[in-house]
Amino acid sequence: MTYTESSVEDVATYLLDLQDRLCGAFEASDGRARFHEDAWDRPEGGGGRTRVIQDGAVFEKGGVNFSHVHGTELPAAASARRPELAGRSFQALGVSVVMHPVNPYVPTSHANVRFFIAEKEGEPPVWWFGGGFDLTPYYPFEEDCRFWHETARDLCAPFGDTVYAEHKRWCDEYFYLKHRAETRGIGGLFFDDLNAWDFETCFAYMRAVGDGYLAAYRPIVEKRKDHDYGEREIDFQRYRRGRYVEFNLVYDRGTLFGLQSGGRTESILMSLPAVAHWRYDWQPEPGSPESRLAEYLQAREWV
């Protein structure tokens, strides 16, 4: 199947349904809080649905956002990275998810699936898919990390023997804080500029990743959400959340594109946790549960 005029509508339909399913599942896991929705319009073209959950029994803060923006030309920074897009109109649509749990034994998670197309009269469209998901534990469990990566591996399998290894490695490299010499978490999948297959296969892979995220994350939430914890664990969780903020504000490509393209600031920055701490040159006590996290913040093979 090749790209047609209805393809953007097909992608948007899937993404809107994915947003609904994710919100329903997270509300069921939380049991108390509900998502608040803001529907918004972008003056330059397009809009979206921002949904945020706060102060829940399980989720301290989380967001599941849909956006579909368009314009007559890309931001200068984006055109500089992809000169072939200069002079083209564009559409960008996707769902972005970040969930920050209350319990420090439940990892923070992130997922994103997106589609981009740039068009110019008389020339073929330029399009690609992107996305992935990654996990950021504070007190990691080996079995949870393996389950996360096994789910990622299995959803990749129908698309080729090398896809998991390639997109897992890309995730490890992308979610790396160079100034800290550590990964943001245990990784998962990351892909961008995907158009090597035909449109339908690329679209199917994006759907597999979007659906696979919930299949990978929700069982971990359910298993760990009632784990006992105290102020020590909360303090460490908030300290480690600082690393999450650093990555999103310094390196994250989606954050930078959203701000540069005039996106809705509140929606773009919903990925940040409600509370994060920074301390000068703090180091965990050797042999402590907190010190174990360092073992998980370097790329490794999980399956």
Image: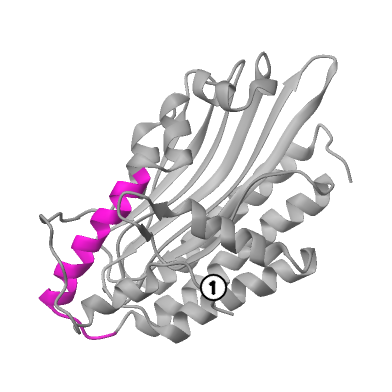
| x and y percentages locating residue 172 in the rendered image | 50, 60
The residue at 52%/81% (across/down) is: 146
x then y, percent, for residue 281 = 13, 58
Is 3 on the left or on the right of 28, as rendered? right
Identified at 41% across, 80% down, the residue is: 222
Task: State which region is magenta.
Answer: 227-248
Residue closer to the observer: 84 or 285:
285
Is residue 66 located in the magenta-colored stretch of the structure? no
Specify whether residue 238 is painted magenta.
yes
Q: Residues within 10 Å of mark 1 (few under 14, many from 20)?
A: many
Does residue 288 appear to the left or right of 28 in the view shown?
Answer: left
Q: Is residue 221 above or below residue 126?
A: below
| Relative to 150, 196 lies left or right | right
Residue at the location (79% across, 46% down)?
196
Residue 83 image-quadrant placement:
top right
Q: Which residue is at 23% across, 76% downward? A: 291
Residue located beneath label 1 in the image: 216
Position in image of residue 134 (x %, y %) = 48, 62
Task: Say left or right for 28 vs 101.
Answer: right
As shown in the figure, which amino acid type bears the numbered disc 1? Ala
Residue 272 visible in rendering: no
Is any part of residue 100 visible from this angle? yes
Q: Main secondary structure of the magenta part?
A: helix
Q: Residue 27's spot in the image, x, y percent?
A: 41, 66
Residue 11, quarter of the rendered image: top right
Dot 1 falls on a residue whose secondary structure is helix
Is the image coloured rainbow, by chain, by secondary structure, or in one colour? one colour
Quadrant that contains the C terminus? bottom right
| Vertical position of residue 260 compared to residue 251: above or below | above
Count of numbered marks: 1
Q: Quadrant of residue 162?
A: bottom right
